[in-house]
Amino acid sequence: MRPRLARALAAWLPWQRWFGGKGRPVAGVDVERTTELVDERPSGGPLGLLVVVSVRFADGGGAERYQVPIGVRTTLPDRLAPAVIAGFDGCVVYDATGDADLNAVLLRLVGQSATRDGVAFTPEAGFAGSSRRGLVGRPLGAEQSNTSIVYGDRYILKLYRRLAAGVNPDLEAHRALRRARSRHIAALLGSIEGEVDGAPATFGMVQTFAANAAEGWAMAMTSVRDLFADPDAPPGGAGADFAAEARRLGGAVAAVHADLARELGTGTATPAALGAGMLAHLDAALAAVPELAPHADRLRAAFASVADLPGAVPVQRVHGDLHLGQVLRTPATWLLIDFEGEPAAPISERTAPQSPLRDVAGVLRSLDYAAQHQLRLFHPTPELRRRARQWTAHNREAFTAGYAEAAGFDPTGRLLTAFELEKAVYEAVYETRNRPDWVDIPLRAVRRLLGEEPE
């Protein structure tokens, strides 16, 4: 079955949302591992496999490794028709993440502390010993890089599609924050781990599911919408001032930073090294975004000035990709999710110590994006532009105040501005490549941060 499965996957993979090699012609797929999930299955029931493949590309660049949970049935229910990969030998092969039967197997294996062909399903204390029978798993549809399966309103299993040698930063961070008894993460309940290239690799992670939670991005967008709809609304938005939540979020981010520092250690970086890195990123961005050229000299000056900061800069493990889409508001508190970082980057890069101000800058840029994105959905009159700037400034101040109160220091200053500029430059590259009509959002931020546009 392997050669035919490899050919079928070579045609199927490029169309998947989570496939990171889009735009690169696939030269071929090698099936590296097939792990059967159950020793015995009911007559007529599905065969479940965890399949690891290596994807080769025609451009000669590096291969990419992916995890594809696969189901095999002789008769396929209509509900699984969209998941079909191929059919041969009287069987249908399909993506198993939509199969409730096989999803139940994955959760049951974790609860039973099972091992299948070198793949370990490991529960955390309190989750072991139970089969979790009867819970139906359904995949969430919004993710770009992975696939998460929700079981009722109790558990969520994240399957990492892009695999790399080493413990996934998401699992490592959650283990550290579990030891710290952090209030600002969904509780870690178990993991699925195996090997890649002879080194440990993370296939999946089980957590509690925050069923009654709202995404930070959706909350911010609603606040801006209400502000635009009601000319008499306060800057935080009509009905409920989002600034109160922004302040609480700032405190939650600071608390997570403190827990990560305590559990995973701290260090220092020289201002000169930070500034040099920012300048290198700028040079690459200028080649990709012509609209940055008029600001090049002032951007270089801003990044070069980082080297003049006094003393060393504290660094530690941080979230690494923090924005309003990576936070959830539960009835009790804010939760931070998805500590994985950029899946395409090496794990060593994603786990490298960084300044916590990078996470702060990420949230500040996300607040600006919420206002500017909502502005695009309205007729952007000068008054609405003014109110968008007012909302952003109001909530930026609330977030940094909440962070300062919990962290014991004020994060604002030249270094934070430099990180915001670096993030805006990165956004300009992203938008140019993916949504060219959105590039005005980061370019406007660059002008504002450089003092070329009013607050």
Image (cartoon, helix red, strand yellow):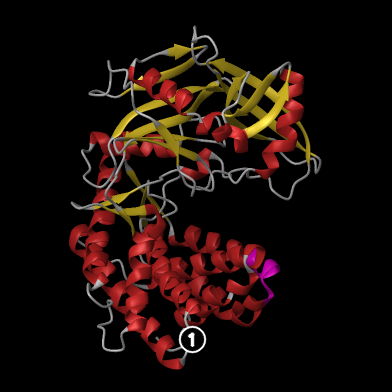
| Residue 359 in sight from this viewpoint | yes
Identify the magenta region.
283-290
Nearest to the observer: residue 101 or residue 277 = 101
Coordinates of residue 60 in the picture (x, y in percent)? 80, 40
The N terminus: image quadrant: top right
Q: Is residue 132 left or right of residue 200?
A: left
Coordinates of residue 91 in the picture (x, y in percent)? 67, 19
Image: 425 above or below 101? below
Give the image quarter of residue 227.
bottom left
Image: 98 above or below 438? above
Q: What residue lies at 29% left-to-right and 41% top-to-bottom?
A: 186
SS class of the residue under badge 1?
A: loop
Q: Is residue 404 left or right of residue 433?
A: left
Label 1 sits on residue: 380
Q: Main secondary structure of the magenta part?
A: helix
Coordinates of residue 51 in the picture (x, y in percent)? 60, 24
| Residue 360 in sight from this viewpoint | no
Image: 287 above or below 89? below
The C terminus: image quadrant: bottom left
The extreme bottom residue here reads: 382
Nearest to the observer: residue 40 or residue 279 = 40
Coordinates of residue 401 in the picture (x, y in percent)? 23, 69
Q: What residue lies at 50% left-to-right and 39% top-to-bottom?
A: 147
Image: 37 above or below 185? above
Q: Which residue type does callout 1 highlight?
A: Pro
Nearest to the observer: residue 275 or residue 408 = 408
Q: What residue lies at 44% left-to-right and 68% top-to-bottom?
A: 420
Whether 289 is among the magenta residues is yes
Whether 175 is among the magenta residues is no
